[in-house]
Image: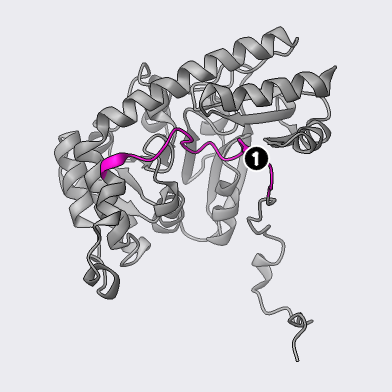
Amino acid sequence: MGGGCAMTSLDLARASLRDVPAYAPDASSCSVDLRDNINLFGTPPSALAAVRATEPRSLTEYPDVAGRALTGALAGQLGLCASEIVTGCGSDDVLDAAFRAVAEPGAVLAHPSPSFSMVPVFARLNGLAPVAVPLMADGAANADAMLATSARIIYLCSPNNPTGTVTAAEVVRRIVRESSAIVILDGAYAEFAPELEDLLSEAPALERLLVVRTFSKAWGLAGLRVGYAVGSAALVQAVQKSRGPYKLNAVAERAAVTALSQDGEWMRRHATEAVECRERTVSALHSLGLSPLDSRGNFVCVPVPDARLVAEQLAVRGVAVRAFSGLPVYGDVLRVGMAPWPVVEQFVRALREVLA
């Protein structure tokens, strides 16, 4: 006996779910994989030691219902109250819960375009109506157009994924001030742009602003799925209720708490290295006659004609990057995550061959 599992012809999903795309990134066997914007500079050493020292009872017992060890550690480091912080299974879990917490089905969620591809998906999964607002020519969010949507939720991402461009803090404040929307600022890549004004400590006082962060990028813990958000106590309480219990497993929480207390210098050093590599990559792309965007993340986004074909040719040469076609404002682009320079240099050499 054996063989593949038969697919049923029954359509058991709810009607509004049927045309929502599933997240299914292509697998890659390339020796150089620069697709995911994760930390390719190593693992935070103290966090790794904490994972290895995990006691068996941490596996057999339920974790803390609300990740209180991590919220406490974050509160101490940020100078906030624990009631102003909510954690989750990655920042995408926090975003999903926040959308569900503050908007009734049918409400409008405005988001930049291009931006994080899962935002309109999460919106639709929660019965919301996503409205895409093209970025401005400089890559910042278009505040006037966002405000004109009269959305219940306005999502912003700075540095933005996949462009790496930024929206100034004062623009975020203006949107909060001039709308009645819940404004959600995704700062997944903020650690790679320490020169930018940070709204984390200000978010609770702004009441309708939720700032979302992750341990997946600069902190190098993508496999453990740890995210968090900061906002007013009332907003955080709503997200916590929507999120549900036990979203942060015990091993992940211990690693994140340990990283915060002991691996901060490691994180900052490798974030700086990623930025230096990014600038070196930008120079190399200019030398190839290309015009990369002004990225402040741990990746470079560069417009390239027929980007998907170029990505396929790079894959033949053992290098995987992310290709996007027909993006608003930018057209076809390649997004290239950063790694130690000898690794990224292989991408540069391969791209030079493809473009020759």
The answer to whether 202 appears left or right of 322 in the picture is left
Residue 208 visible within the image: yes
Q: Please state the horizontal and vertical placement of residue 30, each as a whole percent of the image.
A: 68, 42
From this view, report whether residue 345 is shown above or below residue 230: above
Image-based side of 109 in relation to 46, left or right: right
Q: Main secondary structure of the magenta part?
A: loop
Q: Secondary structure at mark 1?
A: loop
User: Dividing the picture into quarters, in which one does residue 241 lie?
Assistant: bottom left
Q: Quadrant of residue 135?
A: top right
Left or right: residue 173 versus residue 18 is left
Q: Quadrant of the N terminus?
A: bottom right
Residue placed at 43% from the left, 21% from the top? Answer: 273
Percent of width and height locating residue 136: 61, 21
Q: How many marks?
A: 1
Q: Does residue 18 appear left or right of residue 9 in this picture?
A: left
Query: Which residue is at a point 67% across and 79% down the rendered structure image?
Result: 12
Q: Is residue 130 highlighted in magenta? A: no
Classed neighbour count for the residue bearing mark 1: other residues with Cα under 10 Å, few (<14), some (14–19), many (≥20) = few
Q: Residue at x 35, y 55 (%)?
A: 88
Of the residues shown, which amino acid type is indicated by label 1?
Ser
Residue where numbered disc 1 is placed = 31
The residue nearer to you, when weighing 89 against 16, is: 89
